[in-house]
Image (cartoon, rainbow, N blue to C red):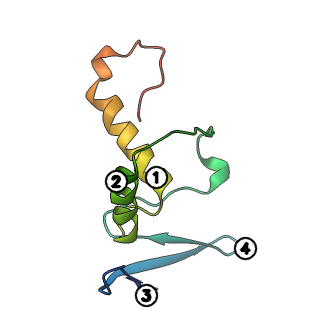
Amino acid sequence: MMIEGCKKLSDGTVVCFPVETKVESKKEKVYLERPGQAQRPPREKREKMELVSLHIPTAQLKALDGLVTRGAYPNRSEAIRDAIRQLLERYRDMLVPNEAQPQ
């Protein structure tokens, strides 16, 4: 089923994007897919995560929130995880073989 998700930006413009919903299992879990974005598996099948707290300059955080608002990422955490994946990929030749590497 296709629906359209829209968000109103602080400058008053409205940004819309198509969203496909899928219903899985008897629990009727609904996962949203954005074009060009891989569907995430249910939480119980994903890798264990740890909470990390960090300080980030206000300007960078506002820019990051702008990407989320415009639909580039579903949330801040996913945007930061993607940035870390790209960083690890860039320096993969410097990683020790036993260190966690992006998949």
Q: Earlier in the sequence, mark 3 or mark 2?
A: 3
Q: How many other residues sit within 10 Å of disc 2, few (<14), some (14-19) or many (≥20)?
A: few
Is residue 41 found left or right of 19 in the rendered image? right
Residue 56 horizontal/vertical position (percent): 43, 43
Is residue 49 found left or right of 20 in the rendered image? right
From this view, report whether residue 54 is shown above or below residue 67. above
Q: Identify the image quadrant of residue 53.
A: top right
- Whether pointer 3 and pointer 1 mark residues with C-beta atoms closer than 8 Å, the reply is no
Q: Earlier in the sequence, mark 3 or mark 1?
A: 3
From this view, report whether residue 39 is shown above or below residue 47. below
Q: Earlier in the sequence, mark 1 or mark 2?
A: 2
Badge number at residue 56 = none
Inter-mark Cα distance, 2 to 4: 44 Å
- Whether pointer 2 and pointer 4 mark residues with C-beta atoms closer than 8 Å, the reply is no
Residue at mark 1: 78
Q: Nearer the viewer, residue 88 or 11?
A: 11
Which of the image's four quarters has the C terminus? top left
Residue at mark 4: 26
The residue furthest front is 58
The residue furthest right is 27
Q: Give amino acid for label 1.
A: Glu
